[in-house]
Image (spheres, rainbow, N blue to C red):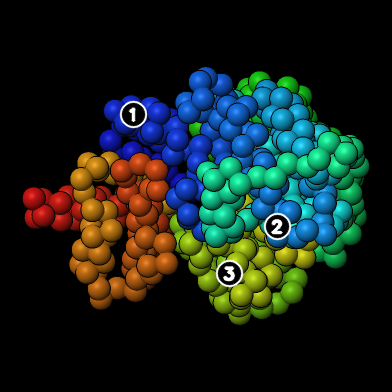
């Protein structure tokens, strides 16, 4: 369970109102300018004047830069796969993206309403040069983004992002002769192909799921999960499906981030006692949250833990990976099964890179992101659903009883606001020195371990704050750990001044 507490008031998109709005939007729009390894694309709010958000001009500029980069990377590959979630600006942005790619002489395969993992699979399956997913993931309705994929259907790296940005800033783009414009075609079969690939996985047991006759409630926040999740459930033999907010209108019925405070409707439905499991996905269906039969959240951190437990039970000892800010429970169950656990820097690209290095059988992030390499290297709520339901079916337990089989840890999420003149890197070095006797990781900020407890400090790349996550077996202790580090930070700042 994760509890978030800001130390000082910060607005909903994470920026102080006192920061110049134009600078803020430029930072969020040009997210690749930060050169963080977790970068996957370009995002921003839709509408307003140029420079104040993600305008149509920006969409064309960065699509053209990415297309140019793709042509330079693999001249023989000429197809780019695109797909979008259900948000209101999606159709407009998709038209801009497709036309821009055609103007570069690239052929466009448009999946239409789709999911992030479906587009990832399609890129590899179509042997395309790359892909663009039009989604702002869990961000609110006014946001959209270009998530950029390489030829493997995986998010581009930090260096790749820097190269795309350099092309965009230099406007070093060669458009095609009018006689060599790219072709445009649609394909609405890939969601079905995605589901068929999931059903073909050896560890997905359709018969076991169908035999349990699960009653399932789905909240897809009025995006493409409303198409994909019921389709998957029906393919798995689930006959009793209650749909909440499954019409992909783009008018999100609630905040689209699948956190308990945003899921009152499905929690209320589950509390009626007429269903076995509640399933929640974000707008692009790469994050999975679960609600137990009594209306209690299974816990966003424990989606990965439960699926990993099932994978490890079936295959014996195996390695797992999550990021530094994810629950220690994954390490506990991995080591119990005889495997090894490793933690990466925050960000899907980093998790995937470490999973490949460690030959991990399962991995992901504590926000409900499941990465199952047997299918593909990308967060995928659909494969997470199939594996979890198989696990739940074979366990013979209710969801709440299954949850109680795992060790309880609680994460406290905080952030402390700093003045722009503070040297954050130097500050983190001072904190690291104070805890030099403890195991410390510096691959992404500073993570300090205390036996089965930890505190992770990460600087923001776009605002003057430090994020402080802590975990312990009680929420009070997790809060205390965070408070102690915040006190240390204030002492260091005071000493400096």
The image quarter containing residue 26 is top left
What residue is rendered at 81% in x and 40% in y? Answer: 177
Query: Where residue 83 appears, x then y in whole percent?
Result: 76, 39
Q: Is residue 115 left or right of residue 178?
A: left
Check disc 3: other Cα within 10 Å, few if <14, some if 14-19, many if 20+.
Answer: many
Q: Is residue 238 left or right of residue 336?
A: right
Of tags 2 and 1, which is closer to the observer?
Answer: 2
For label 2, the SS is helix
For label 1, the SS is loop
Label 2 and label 1: CA atoms lie apart by 37 Å
Is residue 113 visible in the rendered image? The answer is yes
Of tags 3 and 2, which is closer to the observer?
Answer: 2
Label 3 and label 2: CA atoms lie apart by 27 Å
Is residue 116 placed above or below 129 in the rendered structure? above
What residue is rendered at 57% in x and 77% in y? Answer: 340
Query: Where residue 319 appears, x then y in whole percent?
Result: 62, 74
The image quarter containing residue 281 is top right
Q: Which mark is residue 72?
A: 2
Q: Is residue 294 left or right of residue 479?
A: right
Q: Which residue is mark 3?
A: 354
Is residue 108 visible in the rendered image? The answer is no
- Tell me which numbered mark, 3 or 2, is placed earlier along the sequence: 2
What residue is rendered at 25% in x and 76% in y? Answer: 437
Q: Is residue 454 left or right of residue 329?
A: left
Residues marked 2 and 1 touching at CB (< 8 Å): no
Q: Which residue is mark 1?
A: 20
For label 3, the SS is helix
Residue toward you, 6 or 78: 78
């Amino acid at each position: 369970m994760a509890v978030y507490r800001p130390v000082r008031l910060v607005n909903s998109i994470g920026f102080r109102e006192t920061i110049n709005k134009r600078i803020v939007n430029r930072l969020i729009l040009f997210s690749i300018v930060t050169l963080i390894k977790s970068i996957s694309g370009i995002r921003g709010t839709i509408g307003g004047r140029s420079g104040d958000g993600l305008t149509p001009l920006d969409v064309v500029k960065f699509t053209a830069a990415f297309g140019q980069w793709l042509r330079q990377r693999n001249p023989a590959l000429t197809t780019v796969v695109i797909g979008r979630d259900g948000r209101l600006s999606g159709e407009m942005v998709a038209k801009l993206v497709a036309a821009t790619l055609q103007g570069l002489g690239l052929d466009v395969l448009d999946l239409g309403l789709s999911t992030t993992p479906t587009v990832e699979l399609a890129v590899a399956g179509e042997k395309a040069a790359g892909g663009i997913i039009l989604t702002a993931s869990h961000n609110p309705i006014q946001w959209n983004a270009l998530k950029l994929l390489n030829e493997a259907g995986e998010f581009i790296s930090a260096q790749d992002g820097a190269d795309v940005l350099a092309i965009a800033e230099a406007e070093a783009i060669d458009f095609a002769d009018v006689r060599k414009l790219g072709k445009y075609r649609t394909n609405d079969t890939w969601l079905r192909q995605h589901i068929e690939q999931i059903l073909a996985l050896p560890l997905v047991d359709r018969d076991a799921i169908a035999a349990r006759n699960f009653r399932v409630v789905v909240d897809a926040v009025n995006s493409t999960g409303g198409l994909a999740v019921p389709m998957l459930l029906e393919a798995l033999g689930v006959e009793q499906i209650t749909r909440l907010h499954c019409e992909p209108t783009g008018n999100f019925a609630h905040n689209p981030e699948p956190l308990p405070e945003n899921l009152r409707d499905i929690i209320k439905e589950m509390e009626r006692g007429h269903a076995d499991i509640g399933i929640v996905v974000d707008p692009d269906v790469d994050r999975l949250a679960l609600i137990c039969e009594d209306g209690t959240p299974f816990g966003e951190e424990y989606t990965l833990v439960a699926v990993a437990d099932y994978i490890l039970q079936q295959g014996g000892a195996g390695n797992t990976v999550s990021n530094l800010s994810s629950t220690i429970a994954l390490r506990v169950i991995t080591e119990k099964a005889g495997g090894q656990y490793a933690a990466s820097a925050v960000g899907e690209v980093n998790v995937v890179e470490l999973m490949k290095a460690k030959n991990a059988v399962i991995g992901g992030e504590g926000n409900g992101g499941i990465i199952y390499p047997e299918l593909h290297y990308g967060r995928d709520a659909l494969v997470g659903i199939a594996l979890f339901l198989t696990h739940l079916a074979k366990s013979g337990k209710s969801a709440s009883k299954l949850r109680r089989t795992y060790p309880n840890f609680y994460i406290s999420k905080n952030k402390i606001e700093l003045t722009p003149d503070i040297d954050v890197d130097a500050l983190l070095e001072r904190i690291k020195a104070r805890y030099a006797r403890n195991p410390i990781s510096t691959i992404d900020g500073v993570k300090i371990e205390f036996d089965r407890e930890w505190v992770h400090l990460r600087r923001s790349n776009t605002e003057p704050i430090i994020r402080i996550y802590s975990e312990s077996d009680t929420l009070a202790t997790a809060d205390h750990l965070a408070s102690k580090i915040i006190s240390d930070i204030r002492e260091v700042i005071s000493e400096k001044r």
